[in-house]
Amino acid sequence: MKNFFYFFILTGFLLTSCKNERSLKLLKVTEYSSSKVTDTSLVRLLKLKNDLDIKIDYTLSADSALQQLENKKVDLVILPNNTLSYYLKFRTLVPLLPRVLVVMTNKRVNDISINELIHDGTIYFEDMSGLDSVIFNRLYYNFNIDTHHIKKKFSKDLSPEVPSDSLKVYVGFIHLNNTLIRELTDANWYFYSLSNVEHYGKGSRIEGFTMVNSSIYPFIIPMSTFKGRPEKSVLTFAVNDMLVCREDLEEEVAYGITKTIIENKSNLSEMNSIYNLLNFDYDSQVLIFPKHEGVKEYLNRGEPPIWYKYIKMIWPLISISVVVFGVFASLQQRLKRRKKQKIEMYYNNLLEIRDKGDAAVDSDTFIEILKELKKLRSKAMKSLAGKKLDPGESFNIFLALYNEIRDDLSEKIRETRQKEKE
């Protein structure tokens, strides 16, 4: 009887201690096996500090991950902040690790442009799934790289230890704990800087590129990060992974996840040093999805409104501020409408040019249409520089559509000229 009593008490204790545990399914968009070691630390932290039992799985497709999130097959998704999405009911929880564009060569190259590097070498890409194709296409355009000169292979076919007289180039948009980076470093490969790091902060080309591609930002790989490499600091760019969820995730759960990750960066860094790169500055991030209400609550914690203590003193100021704010908001809305109408005008112009391209039949006409397309982009860039357009997702969609139409026209010109020769 006594043993039964103890068994009853123990069972009740276990049930009570386990009833608050929450199980969540996390899906990460990645193609890099090294990231799975990193994710173990994150899962352990959320289990230890927030009593969350998280089951993690991996996929190569951002669209598939978001679809599963929408269909409630998973609860959380980690994906790059450059993902194009039209889902409206997803929310951002926490910025996570940066994915950095790393370029390495098997030979030391000095004072050589990215164009020459790409054209002269055999390129081994990490992006087998096409996850970062949009950013690569923008890079090709911005740096005037002819993709037809790229001798493209995949990094799985790269043998760093095998000597070669020809120039080989590794290109990966990756986390910096990727195992292949260390293999290349051990095999005496060299890091390549996309721009002179001494020009950073003075209008470097990378800053110009990231300015019109708002989801990415300049990134410096410090010297001697990997066993004495790079020998000089490397200027490149990066995009953050983001932890996102559905809008209907409970506020207390979103609050708890955000609090746990942000306040335990040091614990994460002890488990895996790559977490030293975490940066929780939401204001500097152009988020693909707005912040969850639970995240807003955490970020605004401990900040009671100032008028609560001084309401009688500042009431007249509040009244005046309401009027001023109303006028300002009205002007701001009018400006936003103008900018929206402006970008819609550029969309319509792009579609008209595409229709012209569909109707054209000879190469000369295609060339004139291509010139018209480039003039339109130049006009849009001037509007952006003059702050007549918002440098947000709408403009990125304009650039993506522009690139698609440009590539299509270029292909038609080549086909037409071939037929004319025949």
Image (cartoon, rainbow, N blue to C red):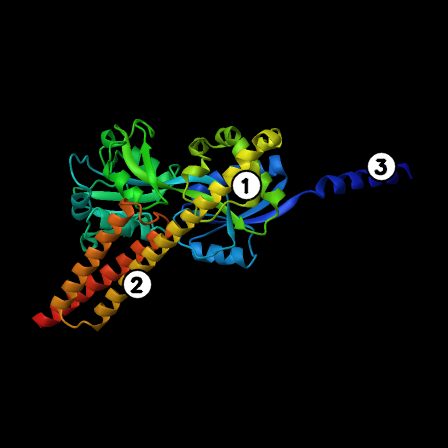
Residue contact between numbered discs 2 and 3, judged by CB atoms under 8 Å:
no
Query: Which residue is at the front of the view, 74 or 280?
Result: 280
State the separation of the CA atoms marked 1 and 2.
37 Å
* Residue wearing tag 1: 295
The answer to which quarter of the image holds residue 222 is top left
Check disc 1 and give the amino acid type.
Val
Query: Which residue is at the front of the view, 391 or 274?
Result: 391
Residue contact between numbered discs 1 and 2, judged by CB atoms under 8 Å:
no
The residue sitting at 42% across, 55% down in the picture is: 85
Q: Is residue 397 left or right of residue 58?
A: left
Check disc 2 and give the amino acid type.
Asn
Tell which tag, 1 or 2, sits nearer the viewer: 2
State the separation of the CA atoms marked 1 and 3.
43 Å
Q: Is residue 230 left or right of residue 120?
A: right
Tell which tag, 1 or 3, sits nearer the viewer: 1
The residue sitting at 87% across, 40% down in the picture is: 4
The answer to which quarter of the image holds residue 226 is top left
Q: Earlier in the sequence, mark 1 or mark 2?
A: 1
Q: Quadrant of the N terminus?
A: top right
| Residue 238 spot, x, y in % from top left | 35, 40
Looking at the rendered structure, which numbered label has been put on residue 348? 2
**Element assignment for label 2:** helix
State the separation of the CA atoms marked 2 and 3.
76 Å
**Element assignment for label 3:** helix
Q: Earlier in the sequence, mark 2 or mark 3?
A: 3
Check disc 3 and give the amino acid type.
Tyr
The residue sitting at 61% across, 45% down in the picture is: 251
